[in-house]
Amino acid sequence: MQISDVPDLAHTRPRPVHWLATATAMASVVALAGLLQPGAATASQSGSGREAAGSPDRAPLPAPDPAAVDFPLECAGAGTVVTRKASGDLDGDGSPETVAAVRCRTNSGTPPTGVYVLTRTGESEPRIVATLVDPKDKQSVTGDFAIRDGVVLATLLGYSGPEVPSCCPDQEERVSWQWKNGAFARSEQPEARSV
């Protein structure tokens, strides 16, 4: 066995100061990595090199066409029909959304209606982003249906109870929806009444 002429190296015996230096270096690397993160993600896609739809240099996209959407209604093969639609900018991004009242195609009765908010990004196909009235609620939309100042306005017909025939809704409700804090908030308008 040969004995070394060199004294013991300091790093062969770790001391608390070495652990402290290592921890400080690691914390610096983690902090630097946090500062170099990419920008926050948004709902719009911008990887195509085009400007965002709401930018002042570019015209807004056309309103989504409900005819290009498959609505989630169970119609037993009868198909769906858009009974009312309105378009306008609901979320303030500079591009219009479309709100569509949709029901199953039928020649009799009062089938329940679904009310859906459609949007599009870039040249993509329209897609449903919110359901304002679920067909399971057994309501239908009547005359008043519009978007004014970013607020969806509608008059809904419904039933006071299960004994009311489906042909003859007996309740009328005026409602509105407005985009607030990342969701559509529903409000009742003052003229709700029985039919």
Image (cartoon, helix red, strand yellow):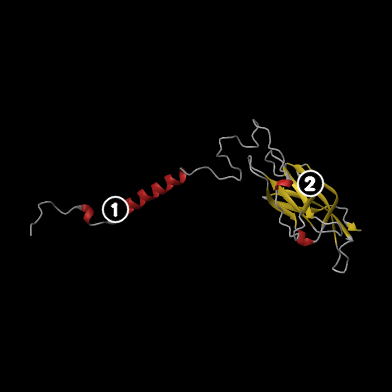
Front residue of 193/58: it is: 58
State the image coordinates of residue 20 (x, y, percent, origin top left).
Answer: 33, 53
Above or below residue 109? Residue 44 is above
Sequence-first disc among 1 and 2: 1
Residue tagged by mark 1?
A: 18
Residue extending farthest to the right is: 195
**Res 172 label:** none
State the image coordinates of residue 163 (x, y, percent, origin top left).
Answer: 87, 69
Instruction: Tell me what residue is drawn at x 85 percent, y 58 percent.
Output: 110
Total number of numbered discs in the rendering: 2
Residue tagged by mark 2?
A: 85
Front residue of 144/151: it is: 144
Q: Which amino acid lies under the numbered mark 2 shown in the image of this protein?
A: Lys
Front position among marks 1 and 2: 2
Q: Quadrant of residue 156?
A: bottom right
**SS assignment at label 1:** helix
Instruction: Tell me what residue is drawn at x 19 percent, y 52 percent.
Output: 9
Instruction: Tell me what residue is drawn at x 30 percent, y 56 percent.
Output: 16
User: What is the spatial separation of the Cα atoms under label 1 and label 2, in whole angstroms?
Assistant: 70 Å
State the image coordinates of residue 124 (x, y, percent, origin top left).
Answer: 63, 43
Q: Quadrant of residue 148?
A: top right
Q: Which amino acid lies under the numbered mark 1 shown in the image of this protein?
A: His
Front residue of 92/162: it is: 162
Query: Callout 1: 10 Å neighbours few (<14), some, many (20+)?
Result: few
Quarter of the picture containing the C terminus is bottom right
State the image coordinates of residue 176 (x, y, percent, origin top left).
Answer: 79, 50
